Image (cartoon, rainbow, N blue to C red):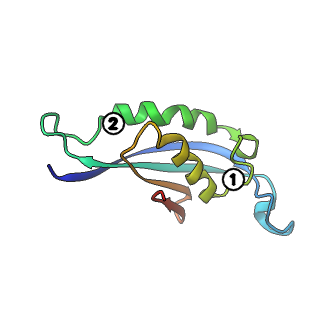
Amino acid sequence: MPKMRIYKEFKFDSAHWLPNVPPTHKCANMHGHTYTIEIHVEDELHPELGWVLDYNDLRNIVEPLVVMLDHKVLNEIPGLENPTAEHIALWLWRKIQPDLPQLAQVVVKENPSNVCIYCGG
């Protein structure tokens, strides 16, 4: 069967600051983003069902994590003390991958032009 990739998009609003940048850097101050994340899954097309994964199953895995992040200060969440887009992508990967071995990519967008893509490894 052919391999295919699907993804589902999620949004959440959070505040953060970056504790390791110089004090004069604008991100040293608390600020917020409306984050968009994409969770990509790659696998063989199921011969009978005709899909890679039920989107509802993907939502059920990811949505509890989105709830943990939405309207929170990210710095206060264990593992996100330095909540760069890169660390958010890693955090999401580590939380999702055990339940979703077909995970192929996590995309974190702070805004439409600031994007981090993590493909595991």
Circle 1: residue type = Pro
- Location of residue 109 in the rendering, given as x and y in whole percent from the top left corner: 54, 56
Residue situated furthest right in the rendering:
23
Identify which residue is drawn at 57% across, 42% down: 12
- Location of residue 68 in the rendering, given as x and y in whole percent from the top left corner: 62, 34
Identify which residue is drawn at 69% across, 53% down: 83
Q: Residues within 10 Å of mark 2 (few under 14, many from 20)?
A: few
Question: Which residue is under mark 2?
Answer: 55
Position above or below: 84 against 54 = below
- 60 sits left or right of 43 in the view: right
Q: CA distance from mark 2 to mark 1?
A: 27 Å
Q: Secondary structure at mark 2?
A: helix
Q: From the viewer's side, name the closer residue of 14 and 95.
A: 95
Q: Are the residues flagged by discs 2 and 1 in contact, CB closer than 8 Å?
A: no
- Location of residue 76 in the rendering, given as x and y in whole percent from the top left corner: 76, 41
Q: Secondary structure at mark 1?
A: loop
Quadrant of residue 53 in the image? top left
Quadrant of residue 8 in the image? top left
Position above or below: 57 against 36 = above
- 1 sits left or right of 101 in the view: left
First in sequence, mark 2 or 1: give its number. 2
Circle 2: residue type = Tyr
- Location of residue 31 in the rendering, given as x and y in whole percent from the top left corner: 74, 53
Q: From the viewer's side, name the closer residue of 70 and 7.
A: 7
Q: Residues within 10 Å of mark 1 (few under 14, many from 20)?
A: many
- 18 sits left or right of 5 in the view: right
Of the numbered discs in the image, which one, if any, rests on residue 83?
A: 1
